[in-house]
Amino acid sequence: MKYELEAPVDGRLKAAIDLPFRMLYHETKLPEHELPDHFHDWHELICVHQGEGKMLIDHSIVDIKARSLIIIPGNTLHRTFQDAENPLTSSAFYISPAVFQGMGGEAASIQQFFERSRKSRNYIQVLNHKQMDEFERWIEQIYTETVSQEHLRTYATLLLLQLMLISLMRMTDAVKPEKTTLSGPIWMAQALKRLDEHLHQPVSLSELAQDASISTAHFSRAFKQHTGMTLTEYVAARRIILSKEKLLRTDDTMVAIAEASGFESLPHFYRLFKKHTGMTPSSYRRLMR
């Protein structure tokens, strides 16, 4: 199975070591340098050291702040919105599922750290100060190893990465999840929820605006402001993600997947899928299984 495809889109993420793994270390981004909405096959783990902002993740817009641990499973739509007055400083890990290949026994459960976030849709946890100190020590150790020229640094980095994930699994097992603070107007949260529940059905801008008791023009402007995407772009991205999941987890035909994911026709499905991934749905299924 190859996971080099659909890797993180940030061009600065060069391979420092021979692992399907990338890292950004203590980076402060200005709002104009923030990545657009995106999704990829790799898992993403973000530690917020300071600052505040908002994040579109899956189908919710949430507040993030210092000590936020953000767990983003592969193929989860997300985008960060910086606070211009108090920008986020964070470290990020991008981890291909290939890192977990070949693990047997208990070790195989490490990947469940990401999968349980997907299932629960609980992507953000706020660490206490002791937990944050421990996480930051792991970040320092892994960064130091990746930039070193020491013998066996690739293997050492892999071991440290696995130990860090085990540590985070234990931390989050012990932490009672906080209620996620949704950001933005209530009607926006309701619209995103409705879209999530009815992705397989046609989307009507006028109906969404009517439900929110606002004009279609106001809805369109506010939707772009809060999500960074037009309604059409958002729905297309969410449908691509849904179709990817069905391609990998079912043996359904392309026609059935296109219909279940809300695409108006098979050619429309193929065209949008190739636009987003660079390959046809059939090629994606063969390559990623």
Image (cartoon, rainbow, N blue to C red):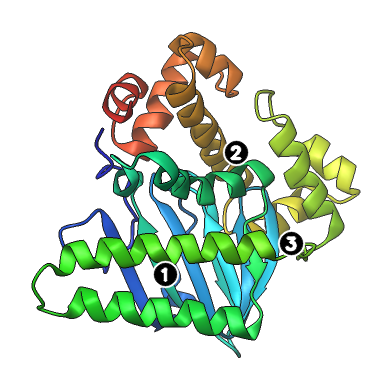
Instruction: State whether residue 52 is above or below residue 276.
Output: below
Closer to us: mark 2 or mark 3? 3
Label 1 packing within 10 angstroms: few (<14), some (14-19), many (20+): some
Query: Does dot 1 land on a helix, a strand or a loop?
Result: strand
Instruction: State whether residue 250 is above or below residue 58.
Output: above
In the rendering, at what x and y percent does residue 6 appear?
A: 33, 44
The residue indicated by pointer 2 is: 235
- Of residue 249 and residue 275, the one placed in the foreground of this image is 249
Query: Does dot 2 land on a helix, a strand or a loop?
Result: helix
- Of residue 102 and residue 242, the one placed in the foreground of this image is 102
Closer to us: mark 1 or mark 2? 1
In the rendering, at what x and y percent does residue 288 appear?
A: 32, 30
- Compared across the picture, whether 212 is left or right of 174 comes to right
Total numbered labels placed on residues in the image: 3
| Kind of residue at disc 3 | Pro
Instruction: State whether residue 191 is above or below residue 26.
Output: above
| Kind of residue at disc 2 | Val
The residue indicated by pointer 3 is: 177
Q: CA distance from mark 1 to mark 2?
A: 27 Å
The residue indicated by pointer 1 is: 92
- Compared across the picture, whether 228 is left or right of 193 comes to left
Q: CA distance from mark 1 to mark 3?
A: 21 Å
| Kind of residue at disc 1 | Ala
Label 2 packing within 10 angstroms: few (<14), some (14-19), many (20+): some
